[in-house]
Amino acid sequence: MLRKSVLEIISFLFILLFVYTAVSKFLDHENFRAVIGQSPLLTRFAPVLAIAVPLAEIAIAILLAVPRYRRAGLYASFAMMMLFTTYIIVLVTLSEKIPCSCGGVISRMTWQQHLYFNIFFVLLALLGMWVHSRQTASGQPIHA
Amino acid sequence: MQKPFQFAAICIMACFTFVLILYAFADKPNDHKNGFMRKQPVVTAVWKRSLDLQYPAYYIAGYADQHIYLGNYSASQHLLTVNLNLKDTQQLTLTMPAGERYAWKLARVMVDSPAVYMTEGSTPALYRGKLDDLNMNRFLPQSCFFNMLQSISFTSFISRSIHIDSLGNKQNILVKITTDSPYVKLGKDIITKQVDGVFCTDGTLDYDRQTGQLVYLYHYRNEFVTLDTNLQVINTGHTLDTNTIAKIQVADMSTGTSKFSAPPTYVNSRARIADNRIYVLSSLLADNEDGKTGQQHEIIDVFSLDKGEYLHTLYIPLKGGARITDFIIKGDELFALQDRTLNVYSIHLLQ
């Protein structure tokens, strides 16, 4: 029971996060595209990424919302947050003056806050993956 | 059997590998040969003393014979003064008239001893006071909008303002603002448009009291313009690198603003005039320099003020990791602002 609610809460938080950031990226699309273009790592792929990133976020949110695909959704959430986090780490340590383009209020955070925020969500996804694996391992039905 | 931790470990490794590959293939400044040479031997400045400013975000607000004044981007009314020996530090606060509203984040303090100004170009709002009492009063309400301001006398200023033509095209131009009618005189065709008119013309302005000349240095092209206080161009000079056209990409937003849409190629960061020379803080390495030199030094190319001729190059050894954001030259000393430190170097002038 506890496991189930933990999973529900984690999935809900990720759905909220991904839908919110994806929608704000779509709403402010021309700005998002320009700002990722300013990143030396992404400038070549900016037009593609400007569509692909928010689409991927929506896709993950849908996976999390459908109980059958929740496991895949949790793994994808982890991978996505890990990718964002490594991007930040690499940029902050190796490069200078990097613009942020994460969408909505999240882009007002400093790099340090951003890193903590991301690491929190990475750990949250990891917790979700672990709880999910325990749930199935102990033989309980995933969803009644 | 699910193995979340195994997945996590593989995922972390994959992410780092992927992002590092992206980084390895990304264009980095000074990665390629820039196609120009600097004169050898260069003059290396010698560090003499430094002052810990304790806070970041300082800028040089002005200087007088014996003092340097520093303003702070995050505290608009704050003024720090220190003498040339970096002693007798004083924290000052400007007193603004009650009930005044201005965009304090954009406000800049400018010291032109014995006057001190608070300038903010988007309202626009100008205040003037004396360094003795720091009581600021509203000044020159007839001024125009500006995004850069330089005082050239107690009754006149040169500003950089955005001019919008009849077709709606925006462009930076230099403007002379005076306390007498007609107050505002536009200096068209001094700053020239290459890409979008605003970003491509960005640069820095400095004024030399001794000769009454100004220099405008572009950030994204190898060019500087010297002019007199009546906005008459005296000379157009070129910095060493080969960037004649600004390498920038600008996207227009539907909101009417513009943004860079690719990393810009930054060429020159600051020009200062002193003793008939123009000191240009450059961002680019020459082909006869290595990356290590660039990491450990700031590079300043020196040009003659009258002809814009390249004279020699100065290396400023960096203290700590921070780059120089602004500098001034007093006699044979260079005062450099680096993050939270004001460093003084001795520069031996070549004759």
Image (tube, coloured by chain):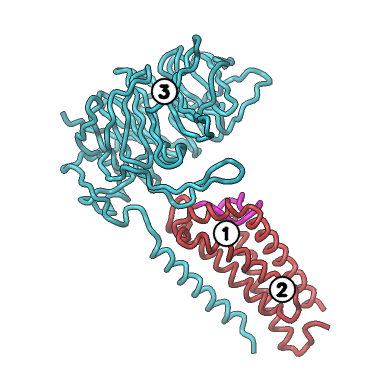
Chain colours: A red, B cyan
Residue plotted at (77% across, 83% down): A142
- Distance CA(mark 2)–CA(mark 1): 23 Å
Q: Residue at label 2?
A: A64
Q: Residue at label 1?
A: A115
Between residue B45 and residue B313, name the one nearer to us: B313
Instruction: Please say whether residue A112 is visible from this viewpoint.
Output: no
Instruction: Please say whether residue A72 is visible from this viewpoint.
Output: yes
Q: Identify the chain of the residue marked 3, using the numbered disc in the image.
A: B
For badge 1, the amino acid type reads: Leu
Instruction: Return the x and y of residue B238 as percentages of the image width and height.
Output: 27, 36
Residue plotted at (53% across, 15% down): B129
Q: Share a chain, discs 3 and 1? A: no
Mark number for residue B187? 3
User: Quick check: B183 left or right of B194?
Assistant: right
Q: Share a chain, discs 2 and 1? A: yes
Please, what secondary structure does the residue beneath circle 3 have?
Answer: strand
Q: Identify the chain of the residue marked 2, using the numbered disc in the image.
A: A
For badge 3, the amino acid type reads: Gly
User: Quick check: B174 left or right of B30?
Assistant: right
